[in-house]
């Protein structure tokens, strides 16, 4: 049984697609949603949304938001969201270096916004590399090099 997934940001509707399963980065951990799921409303963390269809998987980088799950539809209202093919890998790597530099300069007084910037840049790099490597599975927090 498939399920409709709509992903929107304040700027645009990113996609509306029927999938077999969607994996989401919930605030309390990864969630796998299939058609017929019980209704749910939760907060999204920084992470990957993985859209599973047959043997294929599409990856989307998301930086927070909320998700509403109904038995026949998942609606993601993301703060930001980018498909793998939309991510400029060089720009994401430069952002990661800026965040690392900011954190190293701060010493023990680490700025939470710099930590969040590092998480977002690592996420964007990981999702962009899925497109290049053809990987088909999600990564979880801590899998990337920081």
Image (cartoon, grey):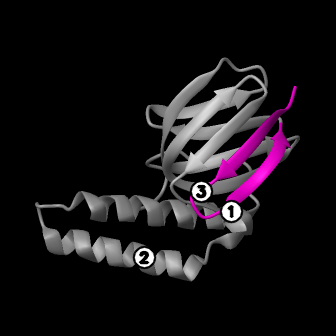
Cα distance between the residues tagged 1 and 3 = 12 Å
Q: Which residue is mark 2?
A: 95
Q: Which residue is mark 1?
A: 83
Q: Main secondary structure of the magenta part?
A: strand
Towards the viewer: 133 or 18: 18
Camera-near label (3 vs 2) is 3
Is 110 covered by the magenta stretch?
no
Determine the residue positioned at 61% across, 33% down: 68
Which element type, helix, strand or loop, lies under badge 2? helix
Q: What is the span of residues highlighted in magenta in the rendered image? A: 1-19
Locate residue 11 relative to residue 113 in the image: left or right: right
Query: Is there a contact, CB below 8 Å, between mark 1 and mark 2?
Result: no
Camera-near label (1 vs 3) is 3
Which element type, helix, strand or loop, lies under badge 1? strand
Dot label at residue 9? 3
Cα distance between the residues tagged 1 and 2 = 18 Å
How far across and how far down the image is residue 34, in percent? 75, 27
């Amino acid at each position: 049984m498939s399920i409709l997934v709509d992903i929107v940001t304040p700027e645009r509707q990113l996609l509306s697609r029927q999938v077999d399963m969607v994996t989401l980065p919930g605030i309390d951990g990864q969630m796998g949603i299939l058609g017929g799921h019980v209704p749910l409303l939760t907060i999204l963390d920084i992470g990957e949304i993985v859209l599973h269809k047959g043997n294929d998987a599409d990856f989307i980088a998301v930086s927070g938001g909320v998700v509403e799950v109904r038995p026949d539809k998942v609606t993601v209202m993301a703060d930001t969201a980018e498909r793998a093919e939309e991510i400029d890998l060089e720009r994401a790597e430069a952002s990661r270096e800026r965040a690392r530099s900011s954190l190293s300069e701060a010493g023990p007084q680490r700025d939470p916004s710099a930590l969040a910037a590092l998480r977002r840049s690592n996420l964007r790099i990981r999702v962009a590399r899925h497109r290049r490597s053809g990987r088909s599975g999600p990564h979880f927090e801590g899998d990337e090099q920081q």
